[in-house]
């Protein structure tokens, strides 16, 4: 039907055949909608101008944020020196940005992005580098959540563990007094995530093929963990 539709409806159909509407990232779709709105017969010039201005001002804020966030991420990678891990700093910011693009969610946007970078380092450690015994020790240290647990870890993981503890303390320092409790939920979610990474590692090292039910339960739990990260600071 696309060839028989008029613009802008034809373009909207084309985009949503590529990415279904429920999965569309609203912020990324905004420039298309602004351009299409201008073609409507009864469009309001004031609303159109305000929409363009709002988009550009918010984009400038995001550009400033990602510049500072990339510096934070590069410093983190340099400090922990886990050279086997994927460099996903921009990707983690983008993931967070798609959840919290509004100006007043700036703190939530950055906290979530930092959590995702820390999760990436943890995931890659279990998947790509740590032995089974090292994974047990890392999981135990994170479950204890105390700097004294650093003695359990191999030398190459100590920098990551210290930075993990420090980053969560920074979250508490940055939040208002009546919002600090949210860090506890994120910490618990991080600990639970570590348990599941350890479980996956044990499956791998024992050549165990988990059942369909195990996979579904694992994915359901993982989704719940990400939701705890995502909505804890909104």
Image (cartoon, rainbow, N blue to C red):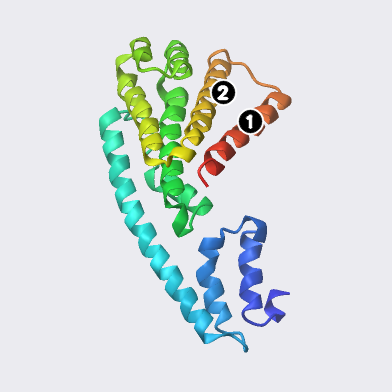
Mark 1 touches mark 2? (CB < 8 Å): yes
- The answer to whether residue 153 is seen in the rendering is no
Residue lying at the far front in this picture: please name it. 177
Whether residue 115 is situated above or below residue 49 in the rendered picture: above
Q: Nearer the viewer, residue 57 or 174?
A: 174
CA separation, marks 1 and 2? Answer: 9 Å
In the picture, the disc for residue 221 is: 1
The furthest residue to the bottom: 41
Q: Is residue 93 visible?
A: yes
User: Which of the labelled discs sits on residue 189, or is there none?
Assistant: none
Query: Earlier along the polypeptide chain: callout 1 or callout 2?
Result: 2
Apparent side of residue 210 relative to residue 150 in the rendered image (left or right): right
Name the residue at 52% across, 47% down. Answer: 234
- Residue at 73% across, 74% down: 1
Q: Nearer the viewer, residue 103 or 197?
A: 103
Residue drawn at point x = 46 percent, y = 36 percent: 180
Task: Determine crowd level at label 1: few under 14, some 14-19, many 20+ residues with C-alpha closer than 10 A.
Answer: some
The count of marks equals 2
Q: Which mark is residue 196?
A: 2
> Who's the residue at 41% across and 46% down the image?
110
Q: Position of residue 144 (x, y in %)?
A: 45, 15
Label 2 element class: helix
72 lies above or below 99: above
């Amino acid at each position: 039907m696309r060839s028989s539709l008029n613009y802008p409806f034809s373009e909207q159909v084309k985009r949503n055949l590529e990415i279904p509407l429920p999965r569309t990232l609203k912020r990324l779709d905004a420039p298309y909608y602004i351009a299409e709105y201008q073609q409507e017969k009864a469009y309001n010039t004031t609303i159109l101008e305000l929409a363009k201005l709002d988009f550009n001002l918010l984009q400038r804020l995001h550009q400033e944020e990602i510049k500072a966030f990339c510096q934070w991420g590069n410093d983190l990678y340099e400090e922990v020196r886990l050279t086997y891990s994927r460099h996903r700093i921009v990707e983690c910011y983008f993931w967070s940005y798609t959840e919290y693009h509004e100006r007043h969610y700036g703190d939530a946007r950055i906290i979530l992005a930092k959590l995702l970078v820390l999760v990436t380092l943890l995931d890659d450690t279990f998947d790509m580098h740590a032995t089974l015994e090292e994974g047990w020790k890392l999981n135990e240290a994170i479950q204890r959540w105390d700097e004294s647990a650093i003695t359990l870890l191999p030398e190459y993981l100590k920098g990551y563990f210290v930075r993990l503890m420090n980053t969560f303390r920074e979250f508490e320092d940055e939040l208002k007094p009546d919002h600090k409790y949210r860090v506890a939920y994120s910490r618990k979610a991080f600990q639970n995530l570590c348990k599941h990474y350890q479980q996956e590692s044990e499956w791998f090292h024992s050549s165990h093929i988990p059942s369909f039910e195990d996979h579904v339960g694992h994915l359901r739990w993982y989704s719940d963990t990400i939701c705890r990260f995502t909505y804890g600071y909104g």
